[in-house]
Image (cartoon, grey):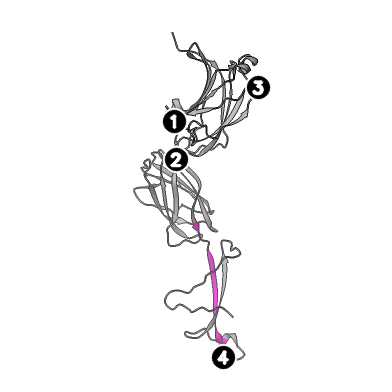
Amino acid sequence: TGYPLYRAAQLHVENVEGDRYSLHPVTIKVRVATPVPVLFGDVVRVQAPEGFELIDSQASTCSGFLWLAWLSAAPRPMPVCACNYGPCEIDMAFDADLKLSVLMQGLAYNASQPLEFQLSSANAARDPVIEQQYWRILHLRTVAASVQILSAAVQPSWHIQPLLQDPTVQLVGMSQAAGAESSFLVTFVPVSVADVAWLVAEFPYEVSFDEAIIDAPQQKDERSSGPNLIVSSLKLDVGIKASMFIGAVRLGRGGGRSIFSLATYRTIELEEKIDENLHFEGFYQPGRAELTNTLRSFYALEPERYPVRSGFPARAGEDGEATFELVFSYAVSVGDHVVLSSEGDGAYYLFADS
């Protein structure tokens, strides 16, 4: 004898939020229909791909289970979830007392009539092996102590995008104002083996890696341009913290909280994206303040009284008046403070104008 053939059931599984990142929580909507009527005593079993947990903190309770569509007068089955051996399963046993079973002539659910429910889970850490990447349904019936499969269906799951862990971008250069040339220190923990990283500076605008310098043995790829930096020879390993020091970065205009995206690739051809983390926050970039000032001697404040000395410049050891004009690249909000100081040898003593 050959292998058995089963009638085709209908199965549709939807990732409601569309989130495909590893270990992120997801809401899963499942719609099922069987070509054979479901009788009392039958079991409909849904099997998740490997790595999708379906049990909440209470044993055998399906996480976030909620009926969405039930088109039968029969009582709704109580779902039981188990993850004992390999992938998690949901068993729905269609049961009724003798009176109701006789009244409904043993029919619990009509053929081809959809039933729909949703549950909560989290994406697997990475794509399972190919044979475990499917959602499955089985319609089971016990006949003479033997469990028979009346119909079955499979649906491939969505691709899991591994999420780079703990990405940080620190501003470590001495010059940190908007538009200055500075340095970044990038750190992250890979989930998968890779050799190339692609960093994108999304905000503030006009960050440029055109003249950026990478410490050897890491190498800057010639395709790096503007806010895009491609670095090879990283030799990334699973769970091992990696870092990149990037010098001669031209900071963006304006200021504020910086935003970056980072992805890793297997090879320099950039054909296979491995890990990814999008739109994460980096450092707080200071804006640029442009300062112009004039300094007058105290005699110049009263030219009528000091007609000659009022024309002299301010001299050491005498009081004077300084006027400052400030232009900011980043908006100054109500409640913000401006601190003006004089530093170094020969620093001035500053007094507020009364």
Front-most of residues 195 and 101: 101
How far across and down, in percent of the image, does residue 27 sit? 55, 35
Residue 289 drawn in magenta: yes
Specify which label sits upstream in the sequence, 2 or 1: 1
The magenta segment: 284-299
Is 262 placed left or right of 71 in the picture?
Answer: left
Q: Check disc 1 and report the residue beneath it.
A: 128
User: Do labels 4 and 3 touch, CB within 8 Å?
Assistant: no
Q: Which residue, given by chain and number where applicable, does mark 2 sit on? A: 275
Question: In whole angstroms, how far apart are the C-alphas of marks 2 and 4?
Answer: 74 Å
Circle 2 packing at 10 Å, graded few (<14), some (14-19), many (20+), is many
Q: Amino acid at mark 2?
A: Asp
Please state which amino acid type lies under the numbered disc 4: Val
- What kind of residue is marked 3? Ala
Q: Is 313 situated above or below 72? A: below
- Cβ atoms under marks 2 and 1 closer than 8 Å: no
Nearer the observer, disc 3 or disc 1? 3
Could you classify mark 1 by the number of other residues whose Cα lies within 10 Å: few (under 14), some (14-19), or many (20 or more)?
some
User: Disc 3 vs disc 2: Cβ atoms closer than 8 Å?
Assistant: no
CA distance separating discs 3 and 2: 48 Å
Q: Nearer the viewer, mark 3 or mark 2?
A: 3
Q: Residue 116 has which mark? A: none
Tell me the chief SS of the magenta region.
strand
Determine the CA span between mark 4 and mark 3: 107 Å
Residue type at mark 1: give it.
Pro
Is residue 21 highlighted in magenta?
Answer: no
The CA span between labels 4 and 1 is 89 Å
